[in-house]
């Protein structure tokens, strides 16, 4: 089982604030991964979707919760996360 965190931008958030916050978000996710956090993949969608602006894939619910608890996009009120359990079948 893997866990997907879908991020939706909060109503009224100016995209310039998202871009201003992105460097702190990037520093945060790089440190999270370097410290052994179960982050597999992360990134924005290229097509606007009301269900989510971006997503991350994690190896455990605990890592997903720990990640978004301190993510600047969340702590600065820009994005609302939600966790989905993903029963993935990998073909690598």
Image (cartoon, grey):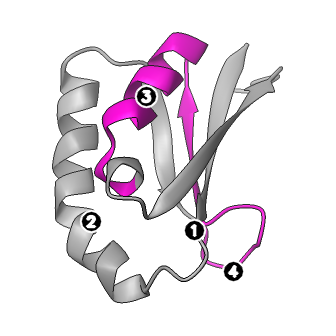
Badge number at residue 48:
4
Sequence-wise, which precedes: disc 1 or disc 3? Answer: 1
Nearer-the-camera pick, 9 or 29 = 9
Secondary structure at badge 3 equals strand
Q: Secondary structure at mark 4?
A: loop
Q: Residues within 10 Å of mark 2 (few under 14, many from 20)?
A: some
Q: Which mark is residue 42?
A: none
- Callouts 1 and 4 close, C-beta under 8 Å: no
Residue 13 horizontal side relative to residue 57, left or right? left
Identified at 46% across, 17% down, the residue is: 63
Cα separation between marks 3 and 2: 17 Å
Magenta stretch holds residue 71: yes
In this rendered view, identify the residue nearer to me: 41 or 19: 19
Calculate the distance from the C-alpha at mark 4 to the C-alpha at mark 2: 18 Å
Q: Quadrant of the C terminus?
A: top right
**First along the sequence among labels 3 and 2:** 2
User: Which residue has dot 2 on it?
Assistant: 22
Mark 3 = which residue? 39
Crowding around mark 1 (Cα neighbors within 10 Å: few <14, some 14 to 19, many 20+) is few
Disc assigned to residue 10? 1
Mark 4 or mark 2, which has the lower sequence index? 2
Q: Residue at x 59, y 45 (%)?
A: 81
Range covered by the magenta-colored residues: 45-73
With 14 as the anchor, is 71 left or right in this view? left
Q: Nearer the viewer, residue 11 or 31?
A: 11
**Secondary structure at numbered mark 2:** helix
Vertical placement of 3 versus 75: above or below? above
């Amino acid at each position: 089982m893997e866990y997907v965190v879908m991020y939706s931008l909060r109503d009224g958030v100016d995209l310039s604030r998202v871009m201003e916050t992105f460097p702190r978000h990037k520093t945060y996710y790089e440190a999270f991964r370097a410290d052994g956090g179960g982050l597999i993949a992360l990134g924005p969608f290229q097509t606007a979707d009301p269900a989510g602006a971006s997503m991350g894939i994690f190896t455990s619910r605990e890592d997903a919760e720990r990640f978004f608890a301190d993510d600047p996009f969340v702590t600065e009120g820009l994005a609302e996360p939600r966790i989905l359990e993903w029963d993935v079948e990998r073909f690598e």
